[in-house]
Image: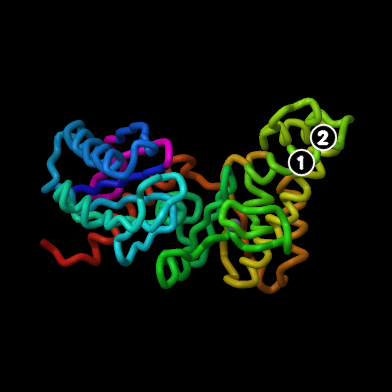
Amino acid sequence: MGFIGIDLGGTQLRVAVADDRGRLCTVVREPTQAARGRDHVIDRIVAAVKEALRKEQTSPRRIRALGIGLPGPVDPAAGLVISPANLPGFRNVPLNRILTRATGIPSYLHHDAHLAALGEHRRGAARGASDMIYVTVSTGIGAGLLLRGELYAGAHGIAGEVGHIVVQRDGPLCTCGNRGCLEAIASGTGIARAASELAPGAPGSALYRLDHPHAEDVARGARAGDELANAILENAGTYLGLAMGTLVNLFNPQLIVLGGSVIKTGNLLLGPMRRSMIASSWKASRRGLRIVRPALGDDAGLIGAVEFARLRARHAPQA
Ligand SMILES: [Zn+2]
């Protein structure tokens, strides 16, 4: 017997067949083609599942459960995709029911960042941690919480929106419509926006010559000693640390797994982050706290989806 894990993003769809112990066997990768709408994407998911089963030379009857992670907001308890920004046409879609019917495998959806947290907890950098927070900072900011070793999704599956903690009153506009969210300041998008806004006033900066500076341009500039680039990263790191300090005070975690492309910038961002986290949290709340890098890379969400399927199969009535 085995399991299926799916990681559905706005650009890429990955389907894995895993063995009974959750080890990935076959992985199928396809472009999502999200712009072609909901029905097309669902057809592609079902086709990719069939393809993965065919490659693995197994059948749906030998698969106990299917777990799928996708961008929020989703309602895992109701099996509903609410309205992910990068999956057009997905509005209140009962995806558990649709996939169960189309594949013949009991299917369970969850938020992709939560499943990445679960993946790191079961098989990655957070193994054995009882209370952990997973935060990934790249184009956006995603997060997942495991409390007492279990996923914490909140009343309707929306917990863990760390990127939308307001850290700066009247700060920059966020994609969610609010101002001063952490994501609007410390994500790759936020860093790029700050560079676009500030570079025209800094003719001495390497960013001044770029039309649309990216977060990577800011990282490169900062490493070369560019003052403006450094100031932007220091600002992003400081606000990231402020949010981390809040999480530390709130949850008293044992472990924070901190990943994503922006974190790869390194100490120019992480130095200010640490200082600000320490300044904004209680020493007692930080006692024994470890901050580590993820161990599963891009596979965290896929592995988490398999682990979620295993978890749900354990709680489902045996066939
Ligand atoms: Zn926001």
Query: Toward the viewer: 179 or 302?
Result: 179
Residue 264 percent location from the top left of the image: 63, 40
Query: Toward the viewer: 6 or 98?
Result: 98
> Looking at the image, is 319 positioned above or below residue 232?
below
The type of residue carrying mark 1 is Glu
> Furthest-right residue in view?
204
Q: Which quarter of the rendered picture does the C terminus lie within?
A: bottom left
Q: Does the magenta stretch include residue 263?
A: no
> Furthest-top residue in view?
209
Do we see residue 17 in this rendering? no
Say few, some or many: other residues with alpha carbon within 10 Å of mark 1 (under 14 / 14 to 19 / 20 or more): few
For image coordinates 59% across by 40% down, the residue present is: 261
Tell me the element at label 2. Answer: helix
Query: Toward the viewer: 212 or 191?
Result: 212
Residue with the mark numbered 1:
197
- Of the four image quadrants, the one with ligand 1 is bottom right
Contact (Cβ within 8 Å) of mark 2 with mark 1: yes
Q: Horizontally, is 167 left or right of 294 in the view?
A: right
Residue 290 percent location from the top left of the image: 61, 58
The type of residue carrying mark 2 is Pro
Q: Is residue 23 magenta?
A: yes
- Magenta range is 10-26
For image coordinates 17% across by 51% down, the residue present is: 105
Residue with the mark numbered 2:
200
